Image: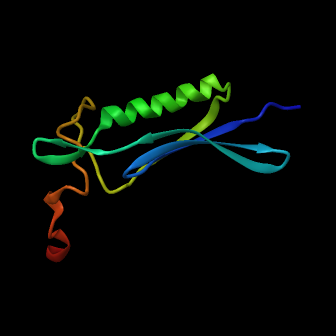
Amino acid sequence: MAENKYYLAVDIGASSGRHILGWLENGKIRIEEIHRFENKLVEQNGHLCWDIEHLFHEVVTGLKKCRELERIPVSMGIDTWGVDFVLLDEAGNRLGNTVAYRDNRTKGMDQIV
């Protein structure tokens, strides 16, 4: 019998995140949540920001859980809220804070646009 190939989906939402492993078993798609974590905004320099270090730590924690379960994914994808961004310099260093879309800096922009 062939060993299962596992695929990992990491969903990072606005208030929580989770790791879901998927695989084919007897012709059916199976999924299992293996890690869930809190995601919250933190205040930095007067702005609401995503805690990138915490999120990175949680993604790595979920990967370690895959190893503990001996279910190493052959592929991994990360889905996020998709409206925020971080500017990087030529060396890949962050140029500023990871300001969230929920921060007041965008208040009223819908009217302007």
User: Dividing the image into 4 quarters, which one contains the N terminus?
Assistant: top right
Query: Which quadrant holds residue 22?
Result: top right
* In the image, residue 20 above or below residue 107: above
- What kind of colouring is applied to the model shown? rainbow
Which residue is nearer to you in this view: 88 or 31? Answer: 31
* Residue occupying the point 84% across, 32% down: 2
Outermost residue on the bottom side: it is 111
User: For residue 64, what is the image quadrant?
Assistant: top right
State which quarter of the image contains the C terminus.
bottom left
- The image shows residue 5 at horizontal and vertical percentages of 72, 36
Query: Where does residue 20 sit, x and y in percent of width and height?
Result: 59, 43
Please give left or right for residue 47 compared with residue 49 in the image: left
Percent position (x, y) of residue 4?
Answer: 76, 35
Whole-percent x, y for residue 12 in the image: 43, 47
Q: Residue at x 21, y 35 (%)?
A: 89
Q: Residue at x 45, y 40 (%)?
A: 37
Query: How many marks do you count on the picture?
Result: 0
73 relative to 83 in the view: left or right: right
The residue nearer to you, when weighing 16 against 28, is 16
Q: Is residue 54 left or right of residue 64?
A: left
